[in-house]
Amino acid sequence: MMTDYKSNLNPPAPNDKRNRACPACQADTSIQNIFCVSETKDFSYPGYEYAQCPSCRSIFLTNRFAEEDLIDFHRQFWGVGKIFQFRFAPEKTLIDRKKFWAEAYRDKFSALNVGKPLTGKLTLLDCGSGLGEFCSAASDAGFRAVGLEPNEDSVKQAQLAFPDAIFVNGNFEDLRLYMQKSDLPEQFDVIALHDVLEHVENPLNFLRVVESLMKPSGRLYVTIPIADHLQHEYLVKYSHNFIAPFHRTLFSKDGFKKALETAGLKILNSHDHSFIWGWTRGLAWQLGLADEYETLRKDPIFCKLDFAVDNLLEKISHDLGRGGEMFFEITKSAYYNTL
């Protein structure tokens, strides 16, 4: 079990600092814990509990953390590349990792063509810009792209790799200070949140700030893992999505719609954007074959077969409307009502 990046996160005391209200729809009655993270679960810290909202069916971590602890956790978690090595292969280099994410985010960038076409020299804010691949794709396509990233190490790497894009290290307040000193407008034409909302402490407040940074006719593009995923119904304890405290909230489709409406936002378009694996691993762990599975994962031939089966099962989930991830095109409620 890897613990080097978890040493500063203390196990929670019973009933201490628990968030019992649903972060999606704000319901706070009769919420039941569905499982407690065990000591054997990869990447997770023992003692943290996930619960499911009986109203909107979103799933969320009940424990709270200080913002600085979460930032430090993410810095070390991504810095050592553990999640990339775990999902693919430990021998992958940083160059392989950058290439993989660059291709993945370029695929996501192409999805910006859904709905009403984007034209002109537009400003784009990428929240949680990481190593800068998505901002680079946006810059190449003609956007004036700005990346906001709390991880200082990631920002430094992004600035070296993609000097044509702008990267701001910090939070929304740091972004506003930067905008005041630059020639950037106060609001953006496009804001992207790719795999971000599931990590933040208070996603509803986060969405409210994002809404304030959008131009009246601006658009928000969000990619999130979905609580309705078929995998969560059968393999919830072993899903890659339940990594404490890495993933804090998994919205259901209904819960996400309610959170957006509370923040003054409306969905224009949505579609499955399956990007989740782990079916075979979850099945192996549920059957008590965890050690055997992890041993087989060292065989390159087995890895290819494992990957193919994962993709097949995810395609079945997608065809049933229960895919692992969704892509949303969103606008302000006031503008939506004029369309």
Image (tube, rainbow, N blue to C red):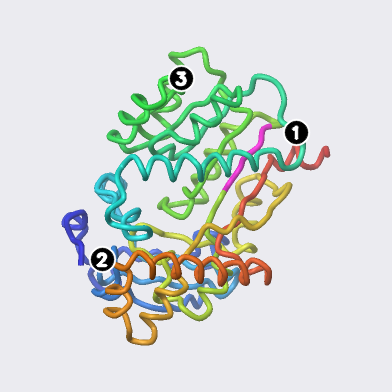
| Contact, mark 1 vs mark 2 (Cβ under 8 Å) | no
Count neighbours of disc 1 (C-alpha within 10 A) and say few if under 14, some if 14 to 19, many if 20 or more: few
Residue at coordinates 57% horizontally, 69% vertically from top-left?
Answer: 312
| Label 2 secondary element | loop
Q: Of 64 and 102, which appears nearest the observer?
A: 102
Which residue is label 1 attached to?
117
Q: Alpha-carbon distance for marks 1 and 2?
A: 44 Å
Q: Considering the whole magenta stretch, tell me its main secondary structure.
A: strand
Amino acid type assigned to the residue bearing label 1 in the image: Pro
Label 2 sits on residue? 45
Q: Quadrant of residue 303?
A: bottom left
Residue 173's tag is none
Provide residue 265's location: percent of width, then percent of height: 66, 45
User: Residue at horizontal 36%, vertical 44%?
Assistant: 96
Drawn side of residue 221 relative to residue 59, left or right: right
Magenta span covers which residues?
218-222
Apparent side of residue 148 relative to residue 208 in the rendered image (left or right)? left
